[in-house]
Amino acid sequence: MTNPVASPRIDPRPTWAVAVHTAKQVLAHVRPDDLGRPTPCDEFDVASLLGHMTSAMMRTEAVGSGTDPFAFPNIITDVPSDAWPATLGAQLDAATAAWADDASLDRVTTLPWVTADGTTMLPTYVAELTVHTWDLAQALGTDVDWDPDAVAMADGVARTLLPDGRCEEMEMPNGMTIPFHSAVDVSSGAAPIDHLVAWYGRQP
């Protein structure tokens, strides 16, 4: 699939920054005794979700800097129980810094689900970060003030890359698995964040 969301060229970095801010707000609520809690992503408890998010942000950094995004395990595990907020927070900052150079927006990257330049690629990570932030917030019982632009960007990516809402059929390298499932139905009047996560197989 090649550049499936190529529309007017819009710099996605401000929206990415908002998604990062939201993730950090939720991350600040994590405590060591939360790590065994279940999450809406059936494969993960809170600890493994945080480990997966950290890996995803390492991939985001790699795409922004033009290095191998699959040089990392699917889940980062070697983090002390009280260090997750600082660890994932630092990786969010590193991912953001990797996209500071305008050249990152022109660089073309090939992933299993898309070949595209940075203006298309970074919104896919807005989507991944936003959905997993929702997972984390649900696990912690934390209310979130969702930014409408970030949710709209994530939803647009989801419906363009996965027009039939069947995430689990995506082929991944190195034995990696997709922590999403087929879309579920929500009412037409549901909140935008609910429409987004339902497209990734979550039950809002």
Image: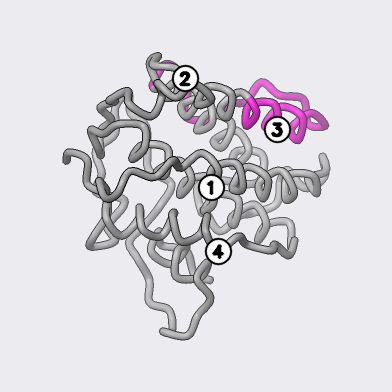
Residue that appears at 50% across and 71% down: 192
Determine contact: label 1, label 3, CB under 8 Å: no
Residue that appears at 23% across and 33% down: 115
Dot in front, 4 or 2 = 4
The residue beneath circle 2 is 72
Looking at the picture, which amino acid does disc 2 mark? Phe
The residue beneath circle 4 is 148
180 part of magenta stretch = no
The residue beneath circle 3 is 89
Earlier sequence position, callout 4 versus callout 2? 2
Tell me if residue 126 comes above or below residue 98 in the rendering. below
Q: Secondary structure at mark 1?
A: helix
User: In x, y percent, where is residue 14?
Assistant: 55, 43
Q: Secondary structure at mark 2?
A: loop
Magenta-drawn segment: 70-93
- Mark-to-mark CA distance, 3 and 2: 18 Å
The residue beneath circle 1 is 15
Tell me if residue 190 comes above or below residue 30 in the rendering. below
Q: How many numbered circles are shown?
A: 4
Quadrant position of residue 32: top right
Q: Secondary structure at mark 3?
A: helix
Looking at the picture, which amino acid does disc 1 mark? Thr
User: In x, y percent, where is residue 19?
Assistant: 59, 47
Earlier sequence position, callout 1 versus callout 3? 1
Crowd class of label 1 (few under 14; some 14 to 19; many from 20; radius 10 Å)? many
- Mark-to-mark CA distance, 4 and 2: 31 Å
Crowd class of label 2 (few under 14; some 14 to 19; many from 20; radius 10 Å)? some
Earlier sequence position, callout 4 versus callout 1? 1
- Mark-to-mark CA distance, 1 and 3: 17 Å
Of residues 188 and 34, the one drawn nearer to the viewer in this rendering: 188
For the N terminus, the quadrant is: top left
Q: Secondary structure at mark 4?
A: helix
